[in-house]
Image (cartoon, grey):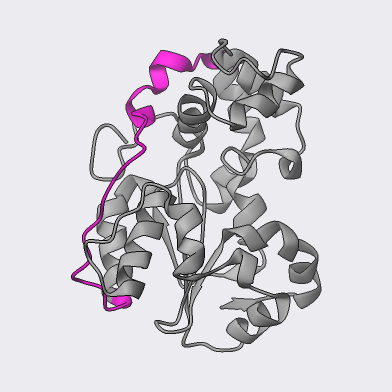
Amino acid sequence: MQHTNFGLLRASFSHMKPTLTVSDRHKFVYVKNRKSGCSTIQLALCRAELDDPNFFSDHIHQDSHRILKTGKHVKFHDLIRLSLVPKFFVFTFVRNPYSRFLSAYLSKISRPQKQKAEVLIALGKDATDLKQHVSFEEFVELVASQAPREMNPHWAPQTTYLLPHLIRYDFIGRFETFEADMKLVLEKLKYSNIELTHFRKTGASYKLDDYYNERTKEIVRQIYKDDFIAFNYGTEMLPSPGLGSHRA
């Protein structure tokens, strides 16, 4: 891991900390990016760490804390140490902002999930009734009114947590080519016998036209303008399959 400014990194560390997964044994740092295949990745890394290709958890983000060194265990001096050891492989995955945002809506807002409560409160609605409808347009407008660091990690701009201006990644995979890119990561980490298990799919990549209109597309383009630039995504909205399935 290499970066350009320790002072700026320290200022951002508390925000970035929850995204970190580290293996001292296998010398990697994975920076988690929500709604970009992170559950599948986390499960694969836990299987590799345990040398158990059959390990499974439906609560992988909670259970990984006891298997790998995650953000709650990483201190700033650990990050500095890792940054000075070139043998550590630092990677993350990114996703087209249009499909990532819609996936967040479909999985966390259109369903009665805990993240919906904070949205209901912000909209002046009863947060105890998670079954009430929040339209896609309402969600778009609400998120547009929030500062990036106030946003929930599932829909915050990817640059907010991945800090590409500070961290020089060894590899940035793409959700749109997830299978091939994860194969490269696992081969790099000598985990070639680990199979990927996909879950929590929303079908967002193939539902873009069902939810977006010109107005919401422009708002989302402005919210995530830094993501489009930093990760070289075009602003034209195209279907973006990922996770090896048309249901990703």
- In the picture, residue 56 is in which quadrant? bottom left
Horizontally, residue 10 falls left or right of residue 225, namely right
The residue positioned 32% from the left and 73% from the top of the image is: 50
**Does residue 187 sit above or below 100 in this rendering?**
below
- Where residue 99 sits in the image (x, y, percent)? 44, 33
Number of marks in the rendered image: 0
In the image, is residue 206 part of the stretch drawn in magenta? Answer: yes
Quadrant for the C terminus in the image: top left
Which residue appears at 61% of the width and 38% of the height?
A: 224
**What's the residue at 24%, 33% (across, down)?**
246
Q: Which residues are magenta?
A: 188-215
Percent x, y of residue 68: 47, 71
- Viewer-nearest residue: 228 or 51: 51
Q: Is residue 224 left or right of residue 38?
A: right
Give how far across and how far down residue 201 sits, in percent: 34, 35
On the image, which quarter does residue 239 sit in? top left
The rendered magenta stretch, by its main secondary structure, is classed as: loop
Q: Can see residue 163?
A: no
Classify 239 as above or below 192: above
Q: Is residue 43 above or below residue 235?
A: below
Residue drawn at (77%, 14%) of the image: 124
Q: Is residue 196 on the magenta stretch?
A: yes
Query: Along the horizontal axis of the image, is 41 left or right of 29?
Result: left
Q: Residue 248, can we see it?
A: yes
